């Protein structure tokens, strides 16, 4: 009976929460270089993957809010944010000017064909994924003011 209960809980967890690791798809840097996503994710640091697009106001608000506290985060915990643009061919030309105008200190990668987005079954943006040792520890969809504080608490709890 305990075995069956364990199995049911295990299956529910895996079905309900999906993947626990990031698929190793190919993304592009702003300079046009192809990179494997797993090579860009730090093995030692907490890594935040923020899926966004240049046309998505909540995405930009979230990245701006994190930008205001990001330097403090880096001083207290070892964290890195990778902003993954899901812009398509029509809107991709807006990404570089936006990055330059915002001055975001994040690593920027482009998911031009939305392969990573599809592989992770992401249907809405912004989508934020927090990783430790390349394993997914937290997923959040959408933006609400102050969510960066929740992210920071999760980062602090898992940084050791």
Image (spheres, helix red, strand yellow):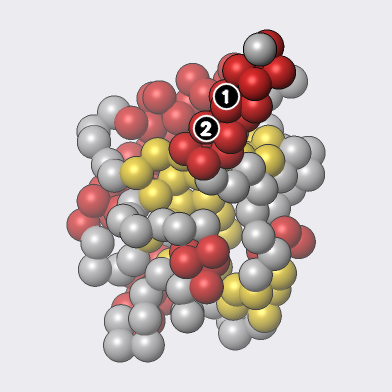
Q: Is residue 160 above or below residue 139?
A: above
Per the image, the residue denoted by label 2 is 12
Q: Is residue 55 left or right of residue 10?
A: left
- Which structural element holds mark 2? helix
Can you see residue 74?
no
Judge by depth and name the residue closer to the eye, 154 or 124. Answer: 124
Quarter placement of the N terminus? top right
Which of the 4 quarters of the picture holds residue 24? Answer: bottom right
**Considering only vertical position in the picture, is 142 above or below 22?**
above
Q: Quadrant of the C terminus?
A: top right
Residue 86's quadrant in the figure?
bottom left
Is label 2 in contact with label 1 (beta carbons under 8 Å)? yes
| Residue behind mark 1 | 9
The picture places residue 147, in percent across and down from the top left corner, at 33, 31
Q: Residue at x 27, y 42 (%)?
A: 143
Instruction: Find residue 111 and report its horizontal and vertical position in percent.
Output: 50, 72
Q: Is residue 147 above or below residue 81?
A: above
Q: In this orientation, does residue 140 appear?
A: yes
Above or below, comparing residue 78 to residue 33 in the picture? above
Q: Give 25 or 13, whichever is nearer the viewer.
A: 13
Residue sitting at the far top: 2
Element marked by disc 1: helix
What x and y, as percent, mark residue 119? Answer: 54, 64
**Distance of mark 2 from mark 1, alpha carbons?**
5 Å
Q: Residues within 10 Å of mark 1 (few under 14, many from 20)?
A: few
């Amino acid at each position: 009976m305990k075995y069956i209960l364990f199995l049911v809980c295990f299956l529910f967890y895996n079905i309900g929460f999906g993947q626990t690791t990031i698929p190793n798809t190919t993304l592009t840097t702003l300079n046009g270089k192809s990179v494997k996503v797993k090579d860009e994710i730090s093995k030692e640091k907490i890594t935040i993957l923020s899926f966004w697009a240049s046309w998505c106001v909540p995405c930009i608000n979230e990245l701006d809010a994190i930008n205001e506290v990001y330097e403090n985060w880096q001083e207290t915990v070892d964290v890195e944010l990778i902003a993954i643009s899901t812009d398509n061919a029509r809107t991709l030309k807006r990404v570089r000017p936006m990055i330059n105008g915002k001055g975001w200190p994040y690593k920027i990668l482009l998911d031009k064909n939305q392969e990573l987005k599809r592989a992770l079954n992401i249907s809405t943006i912004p989508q934020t994924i927090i990783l430790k040792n390349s394993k997914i520890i937290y997923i959040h969809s959408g933006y609400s003011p102050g969510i960066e504080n929740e992210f920071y608490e999760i980062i602090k709890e898992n940084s050791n």
